[in-house]
């Protein structure tokens, strides 16, 4: 296993300082987290990078791969309507060329309601100041919006199932490219017979049929999901596969959108010209004008910045702003700091409505931020 080197105490304190200045409550959530919860929130693509354990009672758990969901759970358990929570501790993810135990310092912010563009700009500025405290002089901002792509697809008039399918793949370029290649293919191609059969059954019968197939094949499922949950996912895939294929014009527009990577205001203007006017898209773009005003008015306004229409990220729960502070020396795949907005996550954790609440946060990697430590 690769381990991070020791960090100088003064360097760590410099990284902590911007988070201390927020007045946030410092918390330390459990290292062990329910596997099914992590997969539901972060997405199946993360499974291969998780460290999974079998609890004595049979429940599968994993070592926390990040702090966002664990801190959100602490906030929900407190019953508070809002709060800022800072943290410092290890997260665990399998890697071929980096440490598996990684130190993070970060913050998660919850509010009953907020001025979202202003709150987002404040988070971007906080992460920028923390990253700069590590001593690097080759940093830049990479901005994105996980909610902008669905609004763009809606403006194009895509079938809802097809739009949902593309949105799920936006963080996985190879799968998204394959999906766009479906243009002109027969509806439902490649989704398999079993999913179609399950889609025709009531949920209870679909679950029972899947369990019977497992028994006949001698398969023991792993990963914390029930037969009902897996059947529901297969049914969703089957229904989405029967949605109309994109028209050539829609495919061209989506590809043009995904290729946008420009200075933020130029990127937004380019996106606005790729789709017909639509209320949801116009609202998103208008919010970005205000968000950029806030960023430019603070210290982060001096940062070189790019807006990527197809932001990267390991976690699928972001539904708004996505921000990374990247180093030219380390490259875009190894951000020094990262975060974003996830308003829908508390509701998903609690099984209820978030009531229009605001949720966002971000973290910094000392192993990358500290210039005397990172490569």
Image (spheres, rainbow, N blue to C red):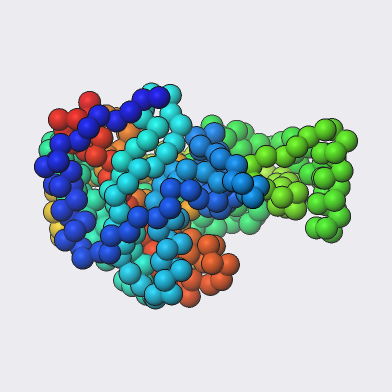
Can residue 324 be seen by looking at this rendering?
no
Q: Is residue 349 above or below residue 176?
A: below
Query: Looking at the image, which residue is at 81% across and 51% down?
Result: 207
Q: Is residue 183 above or below residue 29?
A: above
- Report the number of numbered marks: 0
Can residue 175 be seen by looking at this rendering?
yes
Judge left or right: residue 50 versus residue 184. Answer: left
**Outermost residue, front side:** 56
Q: Quadrant of the C terminus?
A: top left
Query: Looking at the image, which residue is at 39% across and 64% down?
Result: 359
Q: Quadrant of the N terminus?
A: top left
Q: Quadrant of residue 350?
A: bottom right
Query: Looking at the image, which residue is at 25% across and 35% down?
Result: 367
Query: Where residue 286 sits in the image (x, y, percent)?
Result: 34, 64
Judge left or right: residue 78 versus residue 131. Answer: right
Query: Where residue 321 sits in the image (x, y, percent)?
Result: 37, 55
Between residue 228 and residue 255, name the one nearer to us.
228
Judge left or right: residue 204 versus residue 10. Answer: right
Query: Looking at the image, which residue is at 86% across and 47% down?
Result: 209
Between residue 178 and residue 18, name the one nearer to us.
18
């Amino acid at each position: 296993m690769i381990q991070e080197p020791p960090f100088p105490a003064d360097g760590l304190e410099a990284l902590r300082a911007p988070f201390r200045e927020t007045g946030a409550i410092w918390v330390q959530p459990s290292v062990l987290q329910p596997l099914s919860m992590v997969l539901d929130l972060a997405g199946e693509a993360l499974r291969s990078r998780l460290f999974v354990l079998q609890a004595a009672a049979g429940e599968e758990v994993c070592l926390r791969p990040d702090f966002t969901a664990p801190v959100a759970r602490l906030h929900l358990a407190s019953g508070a309507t809002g709060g800022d929570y800072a943290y410092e501790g290890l997260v665990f993810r399998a890697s071929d060329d980096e440490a598996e135990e990684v130190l993070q310092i970060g913050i998660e912010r919850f509010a009953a309601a907020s001025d979202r563009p202003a709150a987002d700009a404040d988070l971007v500025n906080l992460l920028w100041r923390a990253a700069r405290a590590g001593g690097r002089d080759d940093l830049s901002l990479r901005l994105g919006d996980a909610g902008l792509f669905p609004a763009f697809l809606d403006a194009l008039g895509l079938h809802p199932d097809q739009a949902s399918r593309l949105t799920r793949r936006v963080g996985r370029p190879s799968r998204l490219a394959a999906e766009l290649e479906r243009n002109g293919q027969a509806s439902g191609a490649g989704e398999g017979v079993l999913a179609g059969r399950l889609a025709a059954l009531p949920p209870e019968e679909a679950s029972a049929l899947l369990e019977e197939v497992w028994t006949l094949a001698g398969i023991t499922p792993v990963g914390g999901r029930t037969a009902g949950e897996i059947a529901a996912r297969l049914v969703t895939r089957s229904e989405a596969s029967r949605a109309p294929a994109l028209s050539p014009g829609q495919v061209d527009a989506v590809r043009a959108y995904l290729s946008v990577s420009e200075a933020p205001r130029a990127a937004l203007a380019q996106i606005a010209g790729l789709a017909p006017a639509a209320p949801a898209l116009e609202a998103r773009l208008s919010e970005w004008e205000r968000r950029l005003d806030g960023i430019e008015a603070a210290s982060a306004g001096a940062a070189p910045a790019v807006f990527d229409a197809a932001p990267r990220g390991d976690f699928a729960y972001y539904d708004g702003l996505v921000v990374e502070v990247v180093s030219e020396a380390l490259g875009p795949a190894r951000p020094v700091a990262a975060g974003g907005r996830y308003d829908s996550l508390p509701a998903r954790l609690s099984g209820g409505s978030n009531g229009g609440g605001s949720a966002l946060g971000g973290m910094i990697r000392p192993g990358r931020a500290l210039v005397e430590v990172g490569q």
